[in-house]
Amino acid sequence: MMLRSRYMRPAARSCLLAAALLLGSAAGAVSHANEREYDSRIGVFIECLSIRNDALDPGTPVTIIRFNSEEEPIVSGDTHDRRFSGKIVAKTESAEHCLPEIEERKLRDDADEFTLYVVAPVTAGGLDSIEIGIGIVGIAPNDTKPIDLDGNGAVDTFAEFSSLGSLIYDVWSGAPFWGEPLWTGYYVFGHGPEGEDADCNCQSDEAIGPSQPPAPPSDSAP
Amino acid sequence: MPPGKRRILSGAYWVSWVKTYAPTSKEIKDLKGSFQTGVTEFKRALENATPKGAVVVVSHTYRSDQAAYLWHWAWKIANRKIQPKDAKPYALPGRPVPEIEWDHGNSIASVRAAEDMVKGFNLTKDSRFAPLTTRHRDRLAIDMTIKWTGTIHVRKKDGTWVPVTFGPVNANTKLHEVGASYGVKKLLDDAPHWSDNAT
């Protein structure tokens, strides 16, 4: 059973986090291998599914864990009211079908690694409530068992974190924030100007070195 | 640093630390007072535009003090803007205090650890904006992307309808006009950023 970490007592959370740090370093090599495996099964869904897999056939089932604006950012894999079923229709590059993701691709250096798919709901209107979510390929629509992607017996946890310029999505094998996640994905927004002016002018700033004193921090910005 | 307390070296640990102890938010309900109301109404107006509503994806509303601090210095160290030893200790009001040691004793290890944090937080190149002072800390700013195709008509606060054509958001004065009617003002050089005072 998943427990939201922020509700834990501080002492318990400290122990958990310390343990997570140790476990994370021990399990690192394994989880990196898993990460690649799960990349072909898990993606980010906003109107379309964006995933590192260009070989999904029409009809392939997709389960979506919803992360709308006003919902809890941590979801246990046994939470049914945040879980929706769809199926792959076809690949797409159409802004009409998935405008947010088409726009996002302009911001990502790794956009070429992702394929976009139109996803249809299993029942009419069944995906209409989803603003954004994690899409998992290969779980049958009638499969209502708790999600346990790595089969370790612990119900997986799905988490969202709002970062600077992106949303971060994690899938954890069991409780969140222990070791490394099975999978991490992003939806990138990008800060700063748009178009040609958007390039970072990083080279004009000071570099590390004793002859170049640090400039004052830019402490007043968005 | 009080005697007896040990700092924890910078690195990926702090990504989990923020997620656990000082999470940020993309929830509109975490915004403050009338700004929250204005954002809610503006978003609703966009989604109810005609002939087809815009897609509004909110990415960020509230930023914890701890996240602001850790993003700021991790980004600066990872991008070689400062020496690790020159990163300042946490002095923002939020609790708990991140007792972090940025200086690993050599520049390579320190920069790599900061890079791990930048990667874990997925701070993009434009995160040069990672500031300590931000309206997000005051719950008076929102980052969101607004997408639609063609021209839509959006209702302003006063009930009038404005035609808004899709294009670069920073230059879309019609969109800014609608947002401002709800008290949600566009910062002109930062694509997803809106706030109560355009900063």
Image (spheres, rainbow, N blue to C red):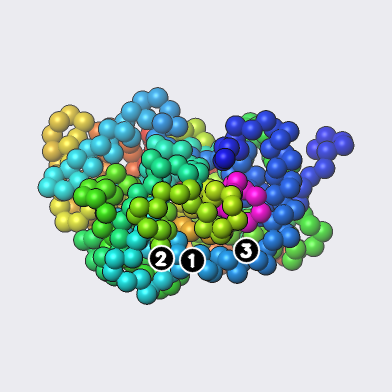
Query: To which chain does the residue with label 3 belong?
Result: A
Question: Which amino acid lies under the numbered mark 3 shown in the image of this protein?
Answer: Ser
Q: Are marks 1 and 2 in contact (CB under 8 Å)?
A: yes
Q: Position of residue A174 (x, y in %)?
A: 59, 49
Residue assigned mark 3: A31
Q: Which residue is mark 2?
A: A51
* Residue A84 in view here: yes
- Residue at (40%, 53%) from the top-left corner? A143
How much space separates mark 3 and mark 2, taking CA atoms? Answer: 19 Å
Q: Is residue A39 above or below residue A124?
A: below
Tell me: A109 left or right of A122.
Answer: right
- Which residue was labeled with disc 1? A39
Secondary element type, mark 2? strand
In this rendering, position of residue A28 left or right of residue B31: right
Left/right placement of residue B10 relative to residue A142 reads: right
Q: Earlier in the sequence, mark 1 or mark 3?
A: 3
The one nearer the camera, A189 or A16, is: A16
- Is A122 inside the magenta-drawn segment? no
**Which image quarter: residue A88?**
bottom left
Residue found 19% across the figure and 56% down from its top:
B149
Q: Tell me the residue at 58%/49% (across/down).
A: A154
Q: Quadrant of residue A34?
A: bottom right
Residue B51 place in picture, x, y as percent: 12, 47
> Which residue: 17% across, 29% down?
B158
Is label 1 in a helix, a strand or a loop? helix
Write the start and end of the magenta stretch as one range: A171-180
